[in-house]
Amino acid sequence: MMLDQQTQPLRFGYTTGACATAATKVALIALITGESQEEVTILIPAGNQVKFTIEEMVISKGQVTAGIIKDGGDDPDATHGALIQSTVSWRKDDRIALDGGKGVGRVTKEGLPIPVGEAAINPVPRQMIEAVAGEILRQYGVGNGVSIMISVPKGEEIAKKTLNGRLGIIDGISILGTRGIVVPFSAEAYTASISLAIKVARKAGCEHVVLTTGGRSEKYAMKQYSYLPQVAFIEMGDVVGFALEECKQQGIKQVSLVGMVGKFSKIAQGKMNVHARKIDINFSFLAQIAKEAGVKETILPDIVRANTAAKVAEIMIGIGNYQFFQLICEYCCQSALAEIGGGLKVETSLYTLSGDFLGKAERQ
């Protein structure tokens, strides 16, 4: 659970996926009605109704392009201020066909949640865009299908400031987001809200809290620790060290860390701020852990050359080596206790992006 500071409220931003969805909705309405609009409201996965201002609208015969400026909130990333466009046009069949245009990257390597060759539009934004298009078509009683092209005019330039190239995404940025909002994890106000959330949990009688890196890992954690009250679940974001210190100082007796291999491989190394801009994944380190887990020497180069931690996890799952995940969990526990000088019990649990349990360890 994450609480806002009353004295210094967080200004959340919105993901490229939310912007692309909003642009698609307003463009499709204009395609059907022929009428331009200045703003549009969508329901994002986080559960909020969010209103977006339309930056541009070009209506032509059989095609409409709408554009929205992406606002990254108080912790803007490389895509803050980018123009996210959606161009919709009629099809002869009844399909909703989604693709990426200029400035949206193409996937060239395995290990990402998108097949090789497709536009780098992640699964949740894809679902959002296709769902809103289907909703509008039904609302207006339209039987035709539509083609949707998401573009980011300056996407290729913006991508140079990201890790896309290393991940095998070329010629543009990714359209991202699982909840539609951008939480300013590195903002001072965010760390203050973590401290407040721990305090609320403590006042509610919790001596055991669960720290997660985001909404998805929190969802898995809530299933794993279903016996704990909601206030015990706290999104620490990337500031792992800060959250652990706060737990110790406020009298928490047990901390459970729940997340995925990418960020937790950094914790296993002793890195306590796991933001992608702060530190990259060390694939040589992962190869060392794999070797310790008994993986054959012939497989280690594949780990070193992997483009994502998810790909490494895929390799380990493929050969049935779950000792690898157990070791990462053990190293995370060791690093956490070393960071705060001991004094509480630490558990670590690892999951895949889709929620498959990979391993767990605990230390005191």
Image: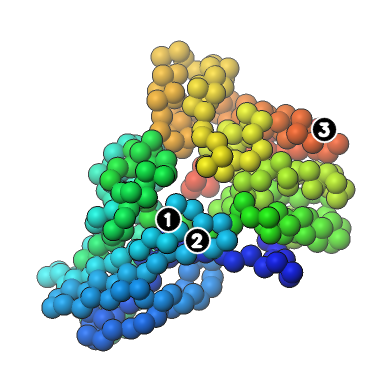
Element under disc 1: loop
Above or below, 198 relative to 21: above
Q: Is residue 120 visible?
A: no
Viewer-side label of 3, 1: 1
Q: For the residue marked with disc 3, what is the amino acid?
A: Gly
Query: So how many labels did they put on this image?
Result: 3
Q: Is residue 107 above or below residue 147?
A: above
Q: Find the distance from the CA under tag 1 to the CA under tag 2.
A: 7 Å
What amino acid is labelled 1 in the image?
A: Thr
Q: Residue at x 38, y 38 (%)?
A: 167
Q: Quadrant of the N terminus?
A: bottom right
* Cα separation between marks 3 and 1: 38 Å
Q: Point out the tag, 3 or 2, that comes first from the N-terminus.
A: 2
Q: Quadrant of residue 98?
A: bottom left
Circle 3 Cα neighbour tier, 10 Å, few/some/many (<14 / 14–19 / ≥20): few
Residue 116, position as x, y percentages in the image: 28, 42
The residue depicted at 44 percent of the width and 52 percent of the height is 78
Q: Are marks 1 and 2 in contact (CB under 8 Å)?
A: yes
Would residue 334 appear left or right of 279 to someone viewing this image? right
Q: In terms of secondary structure, where does tag 2 sit? A: loop
Q: Mark 2, residues whose alpha carbon is within 10 Å: few (<14), some, or many (≥20)?
A: many
Label 3, label 2: how many angstroms apart (C-alpha)? 36 Å
Sequence-first tag of 1 and 2: 2
Q: Which residue is mark 3?
A: 341
Which residue is tagged 2?
A: 72
